[in-house]
Image (cartoon, coloured by chain):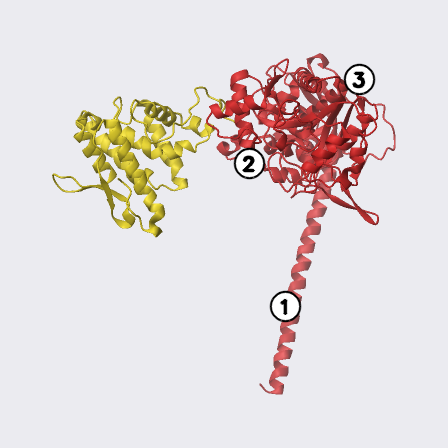
Chain colours: A red, B yellow
Amino acid sequence: MTKDGVQGVAEEADQAQSKKGLKKQQKEAEKAAKKAEKQAKLTTDQQSTDDDDIAKDRYGVAPMVQSSERLDRVLVRVQELTPEKADQLIWVRARIHTSRAKGKQCFLVLRQQQFNVQALVAVGERASKQMVKFAANITKESIVDVEGVVRKVEQKIESCTQQDVELHVDRIFVISQAEPRLPLQLEDCVRPEGEGDEDGRATVNQDTRLDNRVIDLRTTTSQAIFRLQSGVCQLFRDTLINKGFVEIQTPKIISAASEGGANVFTVSYFKTSAYLAQSPQLYKQMCICADFDKVFCVGPVFRAEDSNTHRHLTEFVGLDIELAFNYHYHEVIESITDTMVQIFKGLRDKFQTEIQTVGKQFPSEPFKFLEPTLRLEFMEGVAMLREAGVEMGDEEDLSTPNEKLLGRLVKEKYDTDFYVLDKYPLAVRPFYTMPDPNDNKYSNSYDMFMRGEEILSGAQRIHDAQLLTERAMHHNIDLEKIKAYIDSFRFGAPPHGGGGIGLERVCMLYLGLHNVRQTSMFPRDPKRLTP
Amino acid sequence: MYLLPCHPFAQEVCEFAKMALRELSSLEKALGLKKPNKYSTQGDNKQVPVLQSNSGPALSGLVTIATHLVKQANRADLLGESAEHRAVVQQWLEYRVTKVDGCQKEEIKPILKDLNSYLEDKVYLAGNQFTLADTLMYYGVHHIIMDQSVQDKETYVNVTRWFDHVQHYPGVRHHLHPVVILKNRLYTSSHH
């Protein structure tokens, strides 16, 4: 192409560009004009309808609650909306669980923790068309303040917990608006497994729930699970306090791994390293040697076990017990089993609502236990397993499948979901376990099981410094590393024993759930560090 | 008397031959045959048992030889009393050598499901009559049932019931370990 040719082309290109540009500008101008027109129309519409809106002071988005004034208003709990309050005008603060507009009416379900109630906004003397429209458009999960009259209904509202009443709304204000797109739907969260598949409706998988834990925890099932868990802690404390135990707090940053070097988290500690406690074992025992006689502690336990199973967490809450006894470690077993039975009874008697709520999504058999607690010897358990065709050695530890099978056999024979297996082989227990006085292949140690899964490992501890040293050497443990521990028994130590349970695992097994993450509020495992 | 030198590379397959020969030996005892026969093996990797008889051609194949032994012992009733029964017996004998023998891990469940639904309303494979099909099927599935968990045994409840019945049938169990079958159900609810 000649120079002129190039220039010509360039000029043409310029011209073409400016033509294009003009066109573009024109289009944009048209668009803007249309938009402005629409906006203007809307505002005029709004104004015209505003003028006709008789209810405009009775609904809307309230200004953010910044504590500007202290209203002396009583907010009634949804749980208390019963026929007794019929015809009363009351205020409620709850979440919008669902909203459904139907012509001149809008049906809302207002939810507060485990309870929900139907509310109705209807065009009439008190409510306008615009108000009904507003109510129908409030996003799910938004928190609202509602004033309304409680009315009895002729037909029970099956889908709500408050089945005999509904709220006729007079005023409704949004206190905190939720974003329109929720990361998960609450109805999907509580749908039982299997039901979803039939209807083609979704259930939410565990990872999604855990990633959006704040919303998942709002569901009725989660509320019930964690209320029950709170109950377990409280019953544990109350029962032991009544037995004369003292609650202690033990350090979690320690200088030596308490259970063994493999599964421990290391933290940097100024110029050196320290470990996160795998159990309060050492300190419980030191407290006994310090004459506290009967102690318990509730606190986190850290296990750096790279296990991705249904029942392992890297951090969980340990409920630990340790007590001095007079002459026989069975005194300890009886104290622990009695505590467990008190917890089971307390849950059964005071948390039925929660147990039933969980059961709707995760059906299971009610938890059964015997009084006094069933105690079998290890060898009896082995005999039962052998009778069922399992081959195992006399001093072999129970594998998890064998534990579960034994749990089934015990349930079938004795009709209990909770039992103790006593006199484990010495070879499979930690070095500080007291050997059996009559047969040194066995030990004064025990495990406790719920629904066939182990929840507690305990024993009589060696309280004699010399024997302890011997056993440690037998296990090839570096004596230097446990010097402080052995020293605690050198200046008079009472015979003692104890055990510890995991709060999450006990709740999971009591409710017949299948994954410990369901009973841990913000679970920690090798793959999860948030939320 | 039954074991012949096997090619070292065919060791695994020789196991099949060994198993077949053991079964035939047990069958002879079960049938009350006084004089045990002499077997050899043939075929690729020497896995097919062969019985050389004095009168007539050699018989090869587990089912063929077993059928012959039954007739030899004058127990033709074990092959079925009616034409229909005989056909059913043959069908299950074939199932044993074609489907059960040498089956892969993932084929086990379908086999158990098949047997379980078939046995729902029958005492034995041929209905109400104990036949050779029960004996050979028992030999064939023994290793599967041995390895089953208690829960699986309860899932395939009809197979388990039939198996326990056959393994206790007088004279049947010779070379195989008794498998423990529990009387009571441990896994009652559908949820576990």
Left or right relative to B175: residue A284: right
Q: Nearer the viewer, residue A323 or B54?
A: B54
- Residue picked out by circle 1: A20
Query: Which numbered circle lies on residue A244?
Result: 3
* Subunit under mark 3: A
* Subunit under mark 2: A
Marked residue nearer the N-terminal end (1 or 2): 1
Kind of element beneath mark 3: loop
**Corner quadrant of residue B134:** top left
Q: CA distance from mark 2 to mark 3?
A: 50 Å
- The answer, for residue A449, to whether it is visible in the render is yes
What amino acid type is highlighted by mark number 2? Ala
Query: Which numbered circle lies on residue A202?
Result: 2
Residue A357 % position (x, y): 62, 23
Kind of element beneath mark 2: loop
Q: Mark 2 vs mark 3: give the one in front.
A: 3
